Image (cartoon, rainbow, N blue to C red):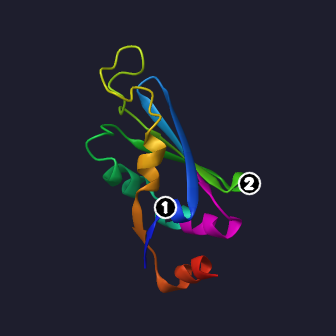
């Protein structure tokens, strides 16, 4: 089953210098294991190809049903020196929520109810 992250999560984003920060939060506790399983650093790096020129780091926060991603070398140097329209990474969360993941049948049952 193909699933857009917007269906199971919400997100916030910002910056620290040239590093974009995206927090992905499950809409329901039962969606967290799906996000945890399918939204890997490799998948995020591929999704932000052409934007993220450095490594992607992932930090799990199971008590919040959230995962935080750091996208290194993504903001053209950061807010004060970047010529990018979004030098502070505020739109990265919207871009993350547009990501489509493919989940197996067993996991899709968590979404269907």
Q: Earlier in the sequence, mark 2 or mark 1?
A: 1
Residue 28 location, quadrant: bottom right
Q: Tell which tag, 2 or 1, sits nearer the viewer.
A: 1
Could you classify mark 2 by the number of other residues whose Cα lies within 10 Å: few (under 14), some (14-19), or many (20 or more)?
A: few
Q: Which image quarter holds the C terminus?
A: bottom right
Q: Where does the image place residue 83, in percent across and percent down from the top left?
A: 29, 20
Viewer-nearest residue: 35 or 4 = 4
Q: Is residue 93 above or below residue 101?
A: above
Query: In what element is the residue under mark 1?
Result: helix
Identify the residue at horizontal 42%, vertical 44% (top origin): 56
Q: Where does the image place residue 72, in percent across and percent down from the top left?
A: 40, 35
Identify the residue at horizontal 55%, vertical 79% (top origin): 107
65 relative to 103 in the view: left or right: right
Q: Where does the image place residue 45, in percent across and percent down from the top left?
A: 35, 49
Q: Is residue 75 above or below residue 83?
A: below
Name the residue that disc number 1 marks: 5
Magenta segment? 24-34
Give yes or no for contact between labels 2 and 1 (Cβ–Cβ under 8 Å).
no
Q: Is residue 35 above or below residue 89?
A: below
Q: Which mark is residue 63?
A: 2
Query: In what element is the residue under mark 2?
Result: helix
Kindly report the distance in space between the C-alpha atoms of the residues bearing marks 2 and 1: 20 Å
19 relative to 59 in the view: left or right: left
Residue 36 location, quadrant: bottom right
Identify the residue at horizontal 70%, vertical 65% (top origin): 29
Total marks in image: 2
Residue 20 location, quadrant: top left
């Amino acid at each position: 089953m193909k699933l857009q992250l917007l269906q199971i999560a919400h997100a916030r984003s910002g910056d620290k210098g040239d590093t974009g920060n995206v927090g992905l939060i499950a809409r329901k506790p039962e969606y967290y294991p799906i996000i945890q399983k399918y939204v890997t650093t490799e998948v995020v790096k591929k999704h932000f190809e052409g934007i993220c020129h450095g490594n992607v780091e992932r930090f799990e926060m199971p008590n919040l049903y959230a995962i935080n991603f750091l996208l290194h070398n993504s903001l053209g140097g950061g807010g004060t020196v970047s010529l990018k329209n979004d030098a502070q990474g505020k739109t990265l969360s919207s871009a993350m929520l547009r990501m489509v993941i493919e989940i197996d049948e067993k996991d899709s049952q968590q979404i269907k109810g």
